[in-house]
Image (cartoon, helix red, strand yellow):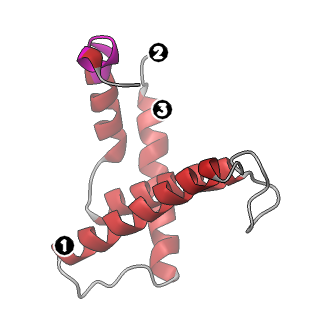
Amino acid sequence: MNITEEHIAALNELAPILHQNAVAHGFHDFTETEGQFLTRAVANLHGEVTELWDAYRDHKLHSPCDKMDTLTCAQEELADIIIRALDTAQRLQINIGFAVAAKHNYNVGRPHRHGNKAA
């Protein structure tokens, strides 16, 4: 399946909304350098991935999450990963819709398991 201009636009429209919320809730210190920001952003993103892994290891992936009973742990953590990634892209002024489309198009042409990588 091809990524359309609508898909690209949707990501690019979502990123600033998520970023503004993160700014409003104090998740951005605009006095820090780009490197300091990126260090913290990557650590926070890693934390969300770790929470997803922990939910799996604790057999709670499909159980209601502790913050919102309308989402499973898998849903909540995957949402957090996407939110943090789009927020970071916006802060770094990355056209994330274009980047996702370009990377997807590249991956479409790659060999099965990208040359025998583990599943």
Depth check: give the residue in front, 62 or 25.
Answer: 62
Q: Which residue shows up at 28% across the image and 83% down it?
A: 30
Depth check: give the residue in front, 17 or 76.
Answer: 76
Q: Residues within 10 Å of mark 2 (few under 14, many from 20)?
A: few
The span from disc 2 to disc 3 (Cα, nearest Å) is 13 Å
Report x, y in % for residue 11: 45, 45
Please identify the quadrant where the C terminus is shown.
Answer: top left
Depth check: give the residue in front, 1 or 8.
Answer: 1
The span from disc 3 to disc 1 (Cα, nearest Å) is 30 Å
Callout 2: SS: loop
**Image depth: mark 3 or mark 1 in front:** 1
Identify residue for label 3: 6
Q: Which residue shows up at 48% across the image and 32% down it?
A: 6
Callout 2 amino acid = Met
The span from disc 2 to disc 1 (Cα, nearest Å) is 35 Å
Write down the region rendered in magenta. Answer: 107-115
Q: Classify residue 111 as left or right of residue 44.
A: left
Identify residue for label 1: 34
**Image depth: mark 2 or mark 3 in front:** 2
Callout 1: SS: helix
Residue farthest toward the right in the current orientation of the protein: 69
Task: State the count of labels.
Answer: 3
Q: Is residue 109 magenta?
A: yes
Q: Residues within 10 Å of mark 3 (few under 14, many from 20)?
A: few
Q: Which residue shows up at 79% across the image and 55% down it?
A: 64
Callout 1 amino acid = Glu
Which of the marked residues, 2 or 1, is nearer the chain's N terminus? Answer: 2
**Residues marked 2 and 3 touching at CB (< 8 Å):** no
Report x, y in % for residue 79: 58, 53
